[in-house]
Amino acid sequence: MWDTNGAKYERWLYNLNRVRKKSGKKYKKAKETYINILRKEDKNWETKWTVDAKAKAAARLKKMGISLSALKAYTEEKWLKDLASKIAA
């Protein structure tokens, strides 16, 4: 056989028309992660881990274009009004 440059199959064997979902549940998971960090902070207390994790989660939300006001609306929609008051919008 010829050199395929590391590929296991020849090019014509791949189905090039197959389309897959690329984002999936990314946005929902980003929101849930921030909410879970707020829950841990509410349940225990503010630790270095929660401060660092909240900063990283907020940066992730900002990168995805999710504003804190949208996150606040999401928490109110999920019946978490006590956590919605902790989000600084």
Image (cartoon, rainbow, N blue to C red):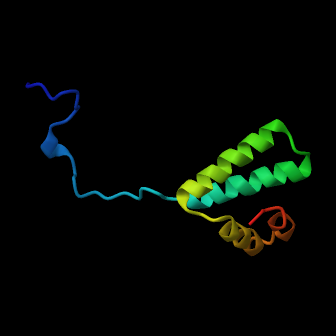
Q: Quadrant of the C terminus?
A: bottom right
Using the rendered image of the protein, determine whether residue 79 is visible from the camera's viewpoint: yes
Give whichever of 19, 33 is nearer the camera: 33
The residue sitting at the front extreme is 89
Q: Quadrant of residue 86?
A: bottom right
Query: Where residue 75 sits in the image (x, y, percent)?
Result: 75, 68
Give whichever of 60, 29 is nearer the camera: 60
Q: Quadrant of residue 13?
A: top left
The residue sitting at the left extreme is 2
Q: How many marks?
A: 0
Give whichever of 84, 23 is nearer the camera: 84
Query: Where residue 49 sits in the image (x, y, percent)?
Result: 78, 38
Residue at 18 percent of width and 27 percent of height: 5
Residue at 22 percent of width and 51 percent of height: 15
Relative side of 10 to 79, left or right = left
Residue at 47 percent of width and 57 percent of height: 23
Relative side of 18 to 51, left or right = left
Relative side of 2 to 23, left or right = left
Using the rendered image of the protein, determine whether residue 25 is visible from the camera's viewpoint: no
Q: Is residue 82 above or below residue 6?
A: below
Query: Where residue 10 sits in the image (x, y, percent)?
Result: 15, 37
Q: Is residue 8 above or below residue 36?
A: above
Give whichever of 26, 50 is nearer the camera: 50
The residue sitting at the right extreme is 44
